[in-house]
Image (cartoon, rainbow, N blue to C red):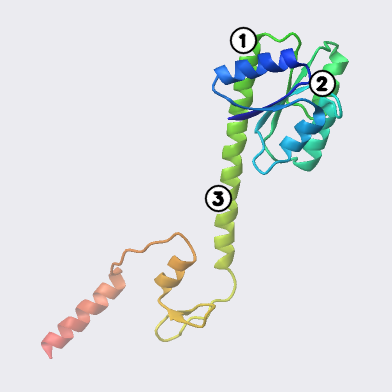
Amino acid sequence: MKILIAEDDPISRCLLEASLAKWQYEVVVATDGAQAWQKLQADDPPELAILDWMMPELDGPTVCRQLRALKPREATYVILLTARTEKADIVAGLEAGADDYLTKPFNRDELKARLGVGVRLVGLQRDLAERVRQLEEALAQVKQLSGLLPICAWCKKVRNDQNFWLQVEDYLASHGDLRFTHAVCPECLAQMAAKLKAEKGG
């Protein structure tokens, strides 16, 4: 997973980068809030970000607010890194849009655990987004089958949008994930048997 580190202090930044690389994360680095904001707007942005509270250009809470305003439904998980330990500051950071916080100096084991939580939640959000996409596709297919459908009263073929007449099973298969097996219903079987019997008797 790609993780953004936004930290202006070189020592903290190096410690974070070394820890994440050791845990097999792909690391993207920003040295101020403006760089962090630019990287979060990229075509393939990091799915998780560690933002320092105090940074040049833009501070961590400001980046959080801008991110949530721009992409409220996307799965960017934000951990705010701060030396502030007052409850009011923590609440302010979370209200700005951060998902979690970590106080400085950070403990590596705690950082690893909090990253693990973030990775799991991002995975769940990704799975949910995929299920929503599949549901939207299914609803679109259902809508394709709604409304008036021209059908031949004699042979029961169906006319498609290109004015071609198709067997019902061919039309349905082209408008949904459907496949057919063919059989004979009891009523038709009885009629066929009666016809064959009449032909033999004749």
Q: Amino acid at mark 1?
A: Asp
**Residue at (79%, 20%) from the top-left corner?**
8
Quick check: 90 above or below 188? above
Q: Could you give the CA–CA distance between mark 1 and mark 3, rounded to whole angstroms? A: 38 Å
How busy is the neighbourhood of tag 1: few (under 14 within 10 Å), some, or many (20 plus)?
A: few
Q: Residue furthest front?
A: 10
Q: Could you say which disc has been placed on residue 53 in the image?
A: 2
In the image, is 179 to the left or to the right of 162? left
**Residue at (66%, 33%) from the top-left corner?**
46
**Residue at (62%, 10%) from the top-left corner?**
109
Q: Amino acid at mark 2?
A: Trp
Decide which of tag 2 and tag 1 comes sooner along the chain.
2
SS category of the residue bearing label 1: helix
Q: Could you give the CA–CA distance between mark 3 and mark 2, rounded to whole angstroms? A: 38 Å
SS category of the residue bearing label 3: helix
SS category of the residue bearing label 2: loop
Residue 16, position as x, y percentages in the image? 67, 17
Residue 130 image-quadrant placement: top right
Q: Could you say which disc has been placed on residue 180 in the image?
A: none
Quick check: 75 above or below 24? below
How busy is the neighbourhood of tag 3: few (under 14 within 10 Å), some, or many (20 plus)?
A: few
Decide which of tag 1 and tag 3 comes sooner along the chain.
1
Q: Could you give the CA–CA distance between mark 2 and mark 1, rounded to whole angstroms? A: 21 Å
Location of mark 1 (residue): 109
Circles 3 and 2: CB atoms closer than 8 Å: no
Pair 1/3: label in front: 1
- The answer to whether residue 113 shows anywhere in this view is no
Of 14 and 61, the residue lying toward us: 14
Circles 2 and 1: CB atoms closer than 8 Å: no
